Image: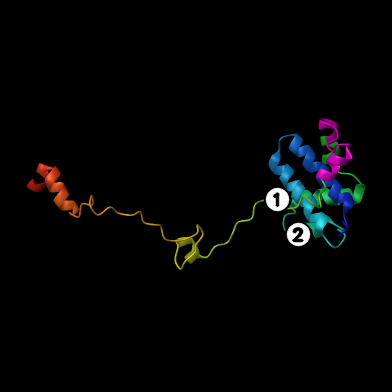
Amino acid sequence: KTNLNPELTGVFTELAALMFRKREVFRGAAFRRVASILARLDYKITSGKQAQRLSGVGACSASCIDEYLRKGNVSRLEALREELGNALPSSPTMLNRMNISEATDRRPRMRTVSAEAFVGGGGEGLFGSTRLPRSPVDESTSDHRSLSEKTTETDPDASLG
């Protein structure tokens, strides 16, 4: 699938890299998410308002899109470049590793489990078999007396009650 918004994707990829370099991980993650969203679209973005309708694109990102479409650059990106230098590596292998089309959502997926399987009803559950194996009981050493009988035998004050 071809990226129909390569310039905007590049802007947000570089913004993300600069934010990560600045140790602002939440902003970096947000910009990386926007770049990923824009890269997967099957239409060209024409305004920030249009992009803001997408889940994951906020007001700040929309204003950056509007500024880029109007002026051809983003002042926030220019300021970060001056402060930190160029964020994107020049090596082609590093650029391939940062390929935004592959950098989609990398969070681990949660496995959905029914309540019966989680609690253990009805056979195989979340953790395998729901029944625990019993250890063999040696009948010769087994003491079949009740707990109250054992208590009164070992604790003389227990019968004073």
Does the segment drawn in magenta span residue 68? Answer: no
Tag on residue 106?
Answer: 1
Say what secondary structure mark 2 lies in.
Answer: loop
Q: Residues within 10 Å of mark 2 (few under 14, many from 20)?
A: few
Earlier in the chain: of badge 1 and badge 2, it is 2
**How far apart are the alpha carbons under marks 1 and 2?**
19 Å
Q: Can you tell which of label 1 and label 2 is closer to the viewer?
A: 1
Q: Three-letter amino acid code at disc 2? A: Leu
The residue depicted at 88 percent of the width and 60 percent of the height is: 44
User: Where is residue 145, by image quadrant?
Assistant: bottom left
Q: Three-letter amino acid code at disc 1? A: Arg
Q: Position of residue 119 (x, y in %)?
A: 45, 61
The residue depicted at 81 percent of the width and 52 percent of the height is: 101
Q: Position of residue 159 (x, y in %)?
A: 9, 48
Tag on residue 54?
Answer: 2
> In the rendered image of this protein, does residue 157 appear above or below residue 122?
above
Asked if residue 75 shows in the view, the reply is: no
Q: Position of residue 140 (x, y in %)?
A: 22, 52
Q: Position of residue 82 (x, y in %)?
A: 85, 32
Q: Are marks 1 and 2 in contact (CB under 8 Å)?
A: no
